[in-house]
Amino acid sequence: MNNDNIYPNCPIITRDVEVGGLTKTQLVNRMGQQSIRVNKFGEILLTDDRFTTSAHKYTMKTVELTVHNLGLPEGGTMIQIYHRADELGLALCPLEVGPFLRLAYLDQPEGYSNNHQHNQAPNGSITVASEIMVEDDDFPKGFYLRRIDGELWLRGYVCDDQHMWNPCDHFIFVNG
């Protein structure tokens, strides 16, 4: 693979995201005020006692890039993606980054509906790379952001260790 296509020598989107300073209830209320939709897996994550928010505000510099730009041209499992990101100096986001990023990124481009794609990241979605809260294939692994039919979503997702992410899937990491 040409190193011009691998992080940091590839197209990336960086964002400074303000995180923390809200309780879980305040965070959920703020998303409601912005008409952000949450699916059932997102609700499971947000209401779990293990999901916490920082009492103090802090800023995270995030990096959005594709699986391909991590040096995985055929795609990869979550374990492979996270390992490769670590090798490149990128870190996993605290789980709370997902909802705060959703609040900060209100102008996400529209994705198109792809109901025919099962067990794949939806078109236009951005997966927030974060520590897995529970090692259970039926428990949500984390959040992804999406705009579909004009509505902003914070969605949770489930997958197992064998799930192959496509090379064009977008992930967000912390600039380690």
Image (cartoon, helix red, strand yellow):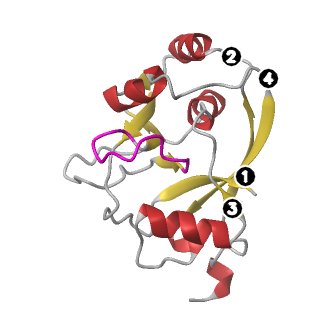
Of pointers 4 and 1, the one earlier in the residue sequence: 1
Q: Is residue 77 left or right of residue 90?
A: left
Crowd around label 3: few <14 · some 14–19 · many ≥20 (10 Å): many
Q: Which mark is residue 14?
A: 1
Q: Quadrant of residue 43?
A: top left
Disc with the residue nearer the chain's start (4 vs 3): 4
Q: Which residue is mark 3?
A: 90
Estimate the x, y position of residue 142 in percent, counting from the top left: 46, 42
* C-alpha distance separating marks 2 and 1: 23 Å
Residue under label 2: 22
Which comes before the other along the chain, label 2 or label 4?
A: 2
Other residues around mark 4 within 10 Å, as few (<14) / some (14–19) / many (≥20): few
Q: CA distance from mark 2 to mark 4?
A: 8 Å
Query: Residue flagged by tag 1: what amino acid is it?
Result: Thr
Q: Which residue is mark 4?
A: 56
Contact between labelled residues 3 and 2, with CB atoms less than 8 Å apart: no
- Separation of disc 1 and disc 3 at Cα? 12 Å
Name the residue rendered at 59%, 14% in the picture: 30
> Where does the magenta region start and end?
129-140
* Residue occupying image coordinates x 19% and y 51%: 116
Instruction: Sort mark 1 into few (<14), some (14-19) or many (20+) by Cα contacts within 10 Å.
Output: some
Of mark 2 and mark 3, the one earlier in the sequence is: 2
Tell me the CA gap for discs 4 and 1. Answer: 22 Å
Q: Disc 3 marks which amino acid?
A: Leu
Q: CA distance from mark 2 to mark 3?
A: 26 Å
Q: Earlier in the sequence, mark 2 or mark 1?
A: 1
Circle 2: residue type: Leu
**Closer to the eye: label 1 or 3:** 3
Q: Is residue 57 left or right of residue 28?
A: right
Secondary structure that dominates the magenta span: loop
